[in-house]
Image (cartoon, helix red, strand yellow):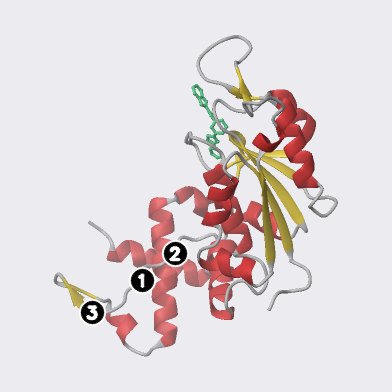
């Protein structure tokens, strides 16, 4: 069964459309596509190259190593992909120079009818193409990749998980209280066996005291966030329970 209308339409402009679409067939996103909750298309600029060699790159003005993606095939591919999207779908260039992509950005994108992602290759795309055709520029982190495709897949994955009906009710509720709104790191997870290499599963998780388990998990999430990512705590108001739990975590982890 497929839904009449997808909740979200995404287009990726990339020199590797098959690799991008193939990656999206697995897991949570793959299921969301199968169920018609999201539609993802890809457009290859090479289709619009104007010479027999299907050339999409050219030498950089000013010299230096590497090549720059040519404007004409890129602009034609962007127009073709845009034509398949609902009006008002923003066009986003993925680059290390973009604004940081975070959970709040994923929530903003998940509320849109659609968006286009442009994945660059080589040394990048002609700046005039960005100015002329892109609405925003996003970075998934401070490192250089070999192309924008992996960044596009990260943005799609984080966004699609937030669409209503994509995750089960239990997973959605957990995501709501932590990843998205609480902005805390996850707590530790355990499964069988009860002992592994001399390490036991914490006692509290093996008892059936659900209030105690909730308290332990919140304590771990607060403690780990404060230790590992203090900047995430800075903009966060702690409840009185949270203050007590964080103090307990610190006392239990003194050394
Ligand atoms: C390559 C290069 C080589 C020599 C000197 C400078 C250079 N810069 C680059 C470069 O940034 N290439 C980019 C590769 C061109 C656009 C697509 N590429 C890309 C995207 N790398 N990293 C990203 C990216 C995207 C989103 N978030 C983080 C990184």
Mark 1: few/some/many CA within 10 Å (<14, 14-19, 20+): few
- Find residue 189 and report its horizontal and vertical position in percent: 36, 71
Residue at image coords 74%, 66%: 7
Ligand 1 within 8 Å of disc 3? The answer is no
**In this view, 59 is above or below 148:** above
- Find residue 227 and report its horizontal and vertical position in percent: 38, 53
Residue at image coords 69%, 61%: 39
Q: Residue beneath label 1, please? A: 189
Query: Residue 193 got which mark?
Result: 3
Which picture quadrant has residue 244?
Answer: bottom left
- Quadrant containing the N terminus is bottom right
- Find residue 180 and report its horizontal and vertical position in percent: 59, 62
Q: Which mark is nearer the camera, 1 or 3?
A: 3
- Quadrant containing the C terminus is bottom left
Q: CA distance from mark 1 to mark 3?
A: 13 Å
Query: Mark 1 near mark 2, Cβ–Cβ under 8 Å?
Result: yes
């Amino acid at each position: 069964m497929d839904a009449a209308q997808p909740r979200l339409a995404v287009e990726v402009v990339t020199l590797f459309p098959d690799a991008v679409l193939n990656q999206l067939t697995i897991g949570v996103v793959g299921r969301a596509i199968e169920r018609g909750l999201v539609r993802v298309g890809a457009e290859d600029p090479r289709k619009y190259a104007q010479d027999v060699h299907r050339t999409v790159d050219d030498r950089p003005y000013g010299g230096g190593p590497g090549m720059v993606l040519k404007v004409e095939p890129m602009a034609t591919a962007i127009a073709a992909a845009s034509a398949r999207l609902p009006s008002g779908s923003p066009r986003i260039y993925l680059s290390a120079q973009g604004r940081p992509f975070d959970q709040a950005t994923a929530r903003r994108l998940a509320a849109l009818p659609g968006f286009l992602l442009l994945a660059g290759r080589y040394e990048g795309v002609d700046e005039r193409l960005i100015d002329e055709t892109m609405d925003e520029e996003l970075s998934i982190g401070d490192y250089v990749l070999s192309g924008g495709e992996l960044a596009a897949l990260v943005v799609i994955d984080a966004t699609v998980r937030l669409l209503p009906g994509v995750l089960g009710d239990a997973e959605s509720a957990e995501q709501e209280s932590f990843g998205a709104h609480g902005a805390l790191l996850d707590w530790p997870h355990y499964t069988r066996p009860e002992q592994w290499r001399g390490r036991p599963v914490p006692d509290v998780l093996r008892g059936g005291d659900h209030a105690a388990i909730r308290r332990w998990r919140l304590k771990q999430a607060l403690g780990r966030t404060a230790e590992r990512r203090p900047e995430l705590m800075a903009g966060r108001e702690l409840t009185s329970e949270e203050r007590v739990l964080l103090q307990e975590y610190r006392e239990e982890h003194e050394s």
